Image: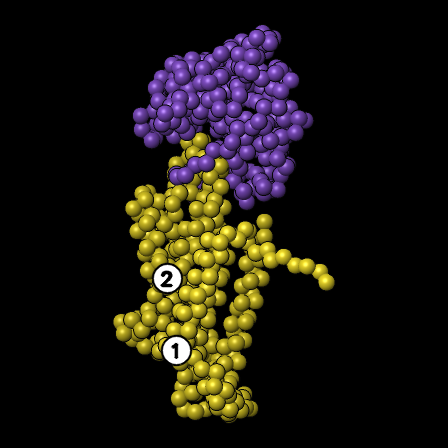
Amino acid sequence: MSRFRFLLGGAWTPRRRLTWMALLAASAVVLVWSARGIGLSVSELVRGLPWIWDLVSRMMPPNWPFLGRLVKPVIETVQIALWGTLLSVLLALPLCFLGARNLSPSLVVFHAMRQVFNALRGINEIIFALIFVAAVGLGPFAGVLALSIHGAGMLGKFFAEAVEEIDAGPIEALRATGTRPSLVVVFGVLPQVIPSWIASTLYRFEVNLRAATILGMIGAGGIGFELVSSLKLFQYPDTAICVLVILGMVMTADYLSSKLRARILAP
Amino acid sequence: MIEIRGLTKSYATIAALRGVDLRVSAGELCVVLGPSGAGKSTLLRCVNRLTEPTSGEIFVAGEPAPRTRAELRELRRRIGMIFQDHNLVPRLSVLKNVLTGRLAAMPPLAAALQLFPVSDIDIALFALRRVDLVERANERADRLSGGQQQRVGIARALAQRPKVILADEPVASLDPKTARVVLDDLRRAAHELGIAVLCNLHQVEYALEFADRIVGVCDGRVVYEGTPAQLDEPALSRIYPGLEAAEMSRAPAAPRRVQERIV
């Protein structure tokens, strides 16, 4: 019989043991409290299983001819993602320099810019879409604007962080040649950040495509509209097709974008 | 070409330079020796004002301290600098890295759009030829070996057509054979092009081999000045107090400087 010794994260002083006990107890209390709040219940789930099965069986067989109706919405979804990404890149590009600690003209501007990025990122695309639907009306353009604004927050932060991670040595070397600051950025900063910027943009496109598949639910264009309509009309075989198509789109985008990113980020 | 009078530099309470007087003539390779923290880097960086001196005067080609940003860039344009870690821009080609030495002389908008005057490209290629790397011009700079990258750094400095070159520990991370090639490039730049080269070194033997003149700095002061032939044991113990002669060639490299704001 071999003997074992419990080794997890360094020495266990009585004080540390007590702290961890307290943390565990506190987490347990919070989780139980939350479970009651949301009505978490295994028996409900078990009782609901036949209904879930019922829904799935009503989707079968998928209504394949419905695919033809989805061509236009799928194209629209990709178009929304494309322009949503492009506009957020255009917004993020000039702002990211102000939000990078090593390039920002002042600490005040830096912190202000970071808060702007956080605010834009913090508000969900769907909420922006609701606002823009009210502002510019139903349709894909509202969706594009929503994705642009939310995406600008994310890309601004990612772009700025890439700028902060650059090697300062080449920058100093360029300054030492008497090069003006704008050209120091072009020749010293951009070559160091562009691979990371492109990777972030591809990732954002991927996220936008996922988001664009549900924008239609609130009338902001794309395949989500077909999905919700089929549910509301109890056309479950159509719903099945929508789900499969969305799955296919998202998986394709994930695959392509991760392949491309791996290639671009290779040294 | 470089004239330094009464130069001092203090960081908060620490005095890095305590009154340095130094002259470097055109066509001369002047090597600065001294232990880590003696103020060698600070001395060099004061010449092109990457570090702002606390007091004292520095004349480069007779010109006094710059008063505006434009004058500062004008001063730096005439001073090439070579760094311990070469500080090339990764992912840019060798030629483009050398061309960055000409940026200050180019029309900025065209340069930003990657349009370079043919005359500047010629100067860059000529500089690459001097360090024997012209056939690598279109390769990415970070694909070259450490020694080759350092020589691209020299080409970048030469492309500035400088009056002065400052070299801050240019061979500290190179093997002895490559180090000699790099130091030979620097010496030829001084002798053949009439550039005043001020070079910090850690290794006494390289100084003896390549320098026209040696300046010893210790604790922020010049403690020796003379030819390599005049550098004897007493002089060395003034430059490296408390260090045996045998240990001198193995003095540790200076720590890398971290710059917070970059432009």
Q: Is residue A46 above or below residue B196?
A: below
Chain name for mark 1: A
Residue A171 falls left or right of residue B139: left
Among all residues in the image, which is located at the extreme right? Answer: A1
Q: Position of residue B12 (x, y in %)?
A: 36, 27
Amino acid type, residue under disc 2 in the picture: Arg
Amino acid type, residue under disc 1 in the picture: Arg
Residue on which the image places disc 1: A36
N-term mark: 2 or 1? 1
Element type where label 1 sits in the image: helix
Colour given to chain A in the rendered image: yellow
Report crowding for label 2: few under 14, some 14 to 19, many 20 or more residues within 10 A (C-alpha).
some
Return the mark for residue A121. 2
Residue B258 falls left or right of residue B183: left
Asked if the residue under mark 1 is in contact with the one under mark 2, i.e. CB atoms within 8 Å, the reply is: no
**Who is closer to the viewer here, B158 or A201?**
A201
Q: Position of residue B59 (x, y in %)?
A: 39, 17
Colour given to chain B in the rendered image: purple
Q: Is residue B181 above or below residue A224?
A: above
Quarter of the figure that contains the N terminus of chain B: top left
Residue B80 falls left or right of residue A6: left
Q: Position of residue B147 (x, y in %)?
A: 62, 32
Quarter of the figure that contains the C terminus of chain B: top left
The image quarter in which residue A62 lies: bottom right
